[in-house]
Image (cartoon, rainbow, N blue to C red):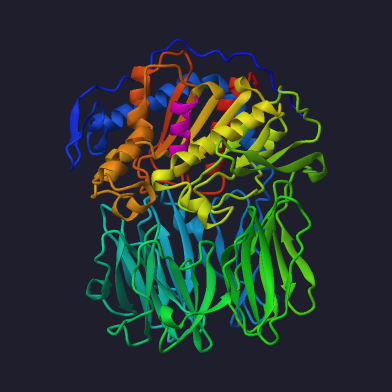
């Protein structure tokens, strides 16, 4: 282990870029006015904007030039732990086994299949390295037709999550002339393999609101629109039921949803399960002769109900998995003989297996105190094998088959960590932190066993805390480079997620949003008080809505942190929520608030990071964004950094990195992304005096 020291880094004496101040008035519907000095950064077509972002990148390169050897070493370490020639566990779909594999030195997966048996000859479905070599940003996936004779290739070549769908004839290996552009990437095949239903989004708001039908061999420009979601607070998706009898159109927002369905060939006649109701969320699937519906109606922690196919409305809902006060019903897998129930209690997953025949139940024992497990890919219902995944902060991602009758658990694959990784050298903890209002916040912690809890260790604390998305104690190959240099790593399971149930989400959104920030700060104070670390050694990290969290704590408790990494941060809350022409707006008003309502406007304004920048000292900051980000537009972090530069009174470093070729997820490819990890780790290691 390389020990960290607390010597101060030396930075060149160069001046940072200064963004021009051009006051622009923003007025709410109810009359309140604000002045935004950096609103002009919103136009990516303005060369001045590109010049400013480029200047910020040059400034970062200059200040961190001395860390280049460290970054190179970190990248080599991270890359060196990855088994470059590797493949996924095959899954069976009808008479085919599908899997993907990676080749040494290449970034993208190669999708493959074998027919009949795993010993059969390999057939390459799509080689991502060949397809993606022409693009600076590339991601893709495949969707086989039910007959397996045609493959849909779904690809994004910009990073803005607009996908092009192409089709490959698997018999000839040739691409079909059909090409559908600017889709959301969501599609579903008809059973005859001749038609796909797919969705498209608004080019500005990115709200997915159109469902089309494409018949292979026809001109996509003539595709039939079968549904338009006209409620501007909702986004729609299309899927096929487990029974394969119905297509399901699910329209939803952060607090509510509703489902319509139709039979193949009957897409002009949609049937409704249950109308949209505020604060009522449900998801439906059809299996055998009825609908199975996961819902929070009369169930804060969700429940599973069943309903007749002919009359599926809530008046006919019958409990299958009743709501529980102490556990959160997260999802299910439907098999011919078994129902698999995925639930969470105190932030840990449990998988329950229930027999349809006699209603007997048992749970899978995972054998660790802090872990994440979940139902994996199970495309076939006529099997007694459950495919599930498992990992912890010390156990690499693992894939198991579990025999639901014999209770035999078979490890199919555990991610190999090269370089001599020994899990026995590390330990993880699960503690409960008492927040300022008395709530108990789960905190997952990992570190090497030779690290002392004497307040001298540096620590990186992470959280998300929005949209009801739970953050789990997961394994990270990259993180080992911090742990082996004496860092402790902690994940705070704060309100805004659903680790502790549906109420945990409600208590961290809308007019309760500040609980998210308070929880994180209270966890930081706990880590300092319990001598895991000290304020001059504590770092924080979060991205997207977790970047909002970073912005909030930067304003609310800057004295607690040595440095903060804010990735693609959502920091200009009011301005974004007022602009109905861009993403993260109308269909997220139930997450953050509607700025047209004075009470909600004032509450958002009270914590919005950009609006609350003051003339005071701030921690060291590394802020990242992507020019083509579709979720949090690049101008939010750019404006935030510009305003911080003009107001901060400290000598701490403030850096903005813009990936000029990427979107919300950062660099594409399994190795390119590691370079961004290396940059972030070098930033905090350098602040602790660690050199190459």
Seen at 39% across and 47% down, the residue is: 510
> Who is closer to the viewer here, 266 or 35?
35
Dominant secondary structure of the residues highlighted in magenta in the image? helix
Seen at 74% across and 43% down, the residue is: 428
> Who is closer to the viewer here, 468 or 389?
468
x then y, percent, for residue 308: 46, 87
x then y, percent, for residue 583: 31, 50
Residue extending furthest toward the front: 438
Residue 554 within the segment the image draws in magenta: yes
Residue 532 within the segment the image draws in magenta: no
> Who is closer to the viewer here, 321 or 458?
321
Please tell me whether residue 240 is drawn above or below residue 331 in the rendered image.
below
Work out which quarter of the rendered image holds the C terminus and state it: top right
x then y, percent, for residue 29: 18, 43
- Magenta residues, start to end: 548-557
> Who is closer to the viewer here, 635 or 57?
635
Residue extending furthest toward the top: 13
Q: In this view, does 177 lie to the left or right of 328?
A: left
Please tell me whether residue 539 is drawn above or below residue 335 in the rendered image.
above
Q: In this view, does 414 lie to the left or right of 608?
A: right
Q: Is residue 148 visible?
A: no
Work out which quarter of the rendered image holds the N terminus and state it: top right
Seen at 43% across and 39% down, the residue is: 568
- Residue 206: name its quadrant: bottom left
- Residue 561: name its quadrant: top right
x then y, percent, for residue 627: 35, 40
């Amino acid at each position: 282990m390389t020990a960290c020291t607390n010597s101060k880094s030396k930075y060149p004496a160069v001046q940072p870029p200064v963004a021009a101040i051009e006051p622009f008035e923003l007025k709410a519907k109810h009359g309140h006015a604000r002045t935004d000095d950096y609103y002009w950064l919103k136009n990516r077509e303005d060369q001045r904007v590109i010049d400013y972002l480029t200047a910020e990148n040059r400034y970062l390169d200059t200040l961190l030039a001395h860390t280049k050897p460290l970054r190179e070493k970190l990248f080599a370490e991270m890359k060196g732990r990855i088994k470059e020639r590797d493949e996924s566990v095959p899954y069976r779909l009808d008479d085919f086994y599908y899997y993907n594999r990676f080749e040494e030195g290449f970034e993208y997966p190669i999708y493959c299949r074998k027919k009949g048996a795993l010993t059969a000859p390999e057939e390459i479905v799509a080689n991502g390295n060949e397809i993606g070599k022409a693009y600076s940003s590339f991601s893709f996936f495949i969707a086989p037709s039910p007959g397996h004779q045609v493959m849909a290739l779904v690809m994004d070549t910009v990073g803005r999550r607009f996908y092009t769908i192409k089709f490959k004839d698997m018999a000839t290996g040739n691409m079909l002339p059909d090409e559908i552009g600017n889709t959301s990437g969501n599609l579903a095949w008809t059973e005859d393999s001749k038609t796909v239903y797919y969705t498209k989004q608004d080019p500005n708001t990115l709200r997915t609101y159109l469902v089309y039908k494409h018949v292979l061999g026809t001109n996509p420009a003539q595709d039939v629109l079968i549904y338009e979601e006209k409620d501007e607070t909702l986004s729609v998706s299309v899927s096929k039921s487990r029974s394969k009898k119905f297509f399901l159109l699910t329209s939803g927002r952060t607090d509510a949803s509703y489902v319509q369905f139709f039979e193949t060939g009957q897409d002009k006649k949609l049937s409704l399960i249950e109308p949209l109701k505020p604060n009522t969320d449900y998801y439906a699937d059809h299996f055998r002769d009825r609908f199975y519906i996961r819902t929070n109606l009369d169930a804060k922690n969700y429940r599973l109900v069943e309903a007749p196919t002919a009359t599926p409305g809530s008046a006919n809902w019958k409990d299958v998995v009743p709501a529980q006060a102490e556990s959160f019903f997260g999802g299910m897998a439907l098999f011919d003989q078994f129902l698999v129930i995925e639930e969470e209690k105190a932030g840990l997953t449990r998988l329950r297996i229930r027999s349809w025949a006699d209603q007997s139940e048992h749970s899978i024992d995972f054998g660790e105190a802090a872990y994440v497990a979940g139902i994996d890919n199970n495309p076939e219902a006529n099997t007694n094998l459950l495919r599930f995944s498992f990992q912890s902060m010390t156990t690499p991602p693992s894939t198991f088959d579990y025999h639901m009758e014999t209770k035999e658990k078979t490890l199919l694959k555990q991610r190999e960590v090269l370089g001599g990784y020994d899990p026995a050298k590390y330990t993880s903890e699960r503690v409960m932190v008492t927040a300022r209002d008395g709530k108990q916040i789960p905190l997952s912690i990992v570190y090497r066993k030779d690290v002392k809890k004497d307040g001298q260790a540096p620590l990186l604390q992470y959280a998300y805390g929005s949209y009801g998305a739970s953050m789990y104690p997961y394994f990270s190959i990259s993180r080992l480079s911090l742990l082996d240099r004496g860092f402790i790593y902690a994940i705070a399971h704060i309100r805004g997620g659903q680790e502790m149930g549906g109420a945990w989400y409600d208590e961290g959104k809308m007019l309760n949003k500040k609980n998210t920030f308070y929880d994180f700060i209270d966890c930081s104070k706990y880590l300092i008080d319990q001598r895991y670390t000290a304020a001059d050694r504590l770092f924080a990290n979060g991205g997207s809505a977790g970047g909002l969290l970073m912005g909030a704590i930067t304003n609310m408790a800057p004295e607690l942190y040595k440095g903060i990494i804010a990735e693609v941060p959502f920091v200009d809350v009011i301005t974004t929520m007022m602009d109905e022409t861009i993403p993260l707006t109308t269909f997220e008003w139930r997450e953050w608030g509607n700025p047209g309502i004075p009470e909600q406007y004032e509450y958002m304004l009270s914590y919005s990071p950009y609006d609350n920048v003051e003339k005071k000292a701030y921690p060291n900051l590394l802020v990242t964004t992507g020019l083509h980000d579709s979720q949090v537009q690049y101008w939010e972090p750019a404006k935030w950094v510009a305003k911080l530069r003009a107001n901060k009174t400290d000598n701490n470093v403030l850096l903005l990195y813009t990936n000029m070729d990427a979107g919300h997820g950062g660099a594409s490819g399994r190795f390119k992304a590691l370079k961004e990890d290396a940059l972030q780790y070098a930033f905090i290691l350098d602040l602790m005096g660690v050199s190459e």
